[in-house]
Amino acid sequence: MDETVLEERVINKFPAPYCLESSPWLQPDFSYLTKKQCATFQDRRKITEEWLKISKVIILGDVAAGKTCLVNRCCRNFFESTYKSTIGVDFEVEKFSILSVPFVLQIWDTAGQERFKSIAQSYYRGANVILIVFDLSNFPSLFNCKKWFDEALGANSGSQPFVFLVGTKKDLVSNVCYKNIRADAVKLAKELNAEYWGVSSKSGKNVNKLFCRVAALSFDEIISKGFESDKRCIAIGDRLGGRYDRSLTKEKKAGRKCCK
Ligand SMILES: Nc1nc2c(ncn2[C@@H]2O[C@H](COP(=O)(O)OP(=O)(O)OP(=O)(O)O)[C@@H](O)[C@H]2O)c(=O)[nH]1
């Protein structure tokens, strides 16, 4: 295992959703294809760079909804109470080890301010995961989430990114208040085919769990899809009647060639 990966970033068991009723993805474990693919990793140490998969995560939401604090808590275990607006976009990289395979989340923190919108939007494309953030202590910010969702999905038409609806600042709301806003958030999450989470970047509550869930879902999709395209390439190679060298490195090279 990569020694630079933090203990809490080592995932061997599929992380559960925040609550079952608020998730479109109810699989209890990594898919069969992913587990099969990862089981061969030990034999493939020499081609690690081909295994290093990256998931692009974009974080959007209203001004001061708590996007930067969420990223800071995840990537630096740090909380800043003074508000500084994000200018344009910022990004962080977080390393994971999932089923003993290295994996990276490339996390893009976008500005909520209208004047940076066009800069931020140019980073929406190619997202594997979209985190739409609202402030649990500012109820109207929930209703703007649909607008953020439409914009992010519009830039990613043709692909199906995982969408999360994340309520931040849970430490600021009473239990009664939280129950009410959570009911509305779960309803909206269902409409958007998104998974709902309630977190606090100040206390850290649920932040690590959220990002482990994000990493595991996108890892599972990326690795199992890779397996499917490897299989297709092998089949094409076989059909062309060429001698197919089964040594692992060459299998990968052949795969890349015919994928092009
Ligand atoms: N109490 C509490 N305050 C929070 C939490 N998350 C963020 N804040 C505060 O909310 C304010 C805005 O947080 P940011 O993370 O900077 O907001 P943002 O969404 O990145 O804002 P823009 O960059 O302008 O889009 C800051 O003063 C934070 O300290 C939280 O979980 N609890």
Image (cartoon, grey):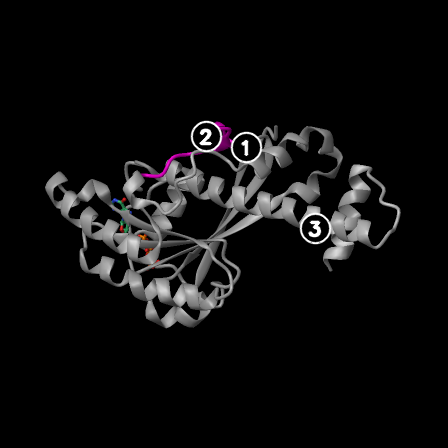
Disc number for residue 101:
none
Graded by Cα atoms within 10 Å as few (under 14), some (14 to 19) or many (20 or more), the crowding at tag 2 reads few
* Location of residue 76 by image quarter: top left
The mark nearer the N terminus, 3 or 2, is 2
**How far across and how far down the image is residue 11, in percent?**
49, 31
Q: Which of the image's four quarters has the N terminus? A: top right
Q: Please identify, in this view, whether the residue under mark 3 or under mark 2 is nearer the observer.
A: 3
Q: Is residue 231 or residue 58 the one in the foreground?
A: 231
Disc number for residue 5:
1
In the displayed structure, does residue 182 sit left or right of residue 37?
A: left
From this viewpoint, which residue is outermost toward the left? 176
Disc number for residue 8:
2
**How far across and how far down the image is residue 188, in percent?**
26, 56
Q: Which residues are magenta?
A: 6-18
The mark nearer the N terminus, 1 or 3, is 1
Mark 1 lies on a secondary structure that is loop
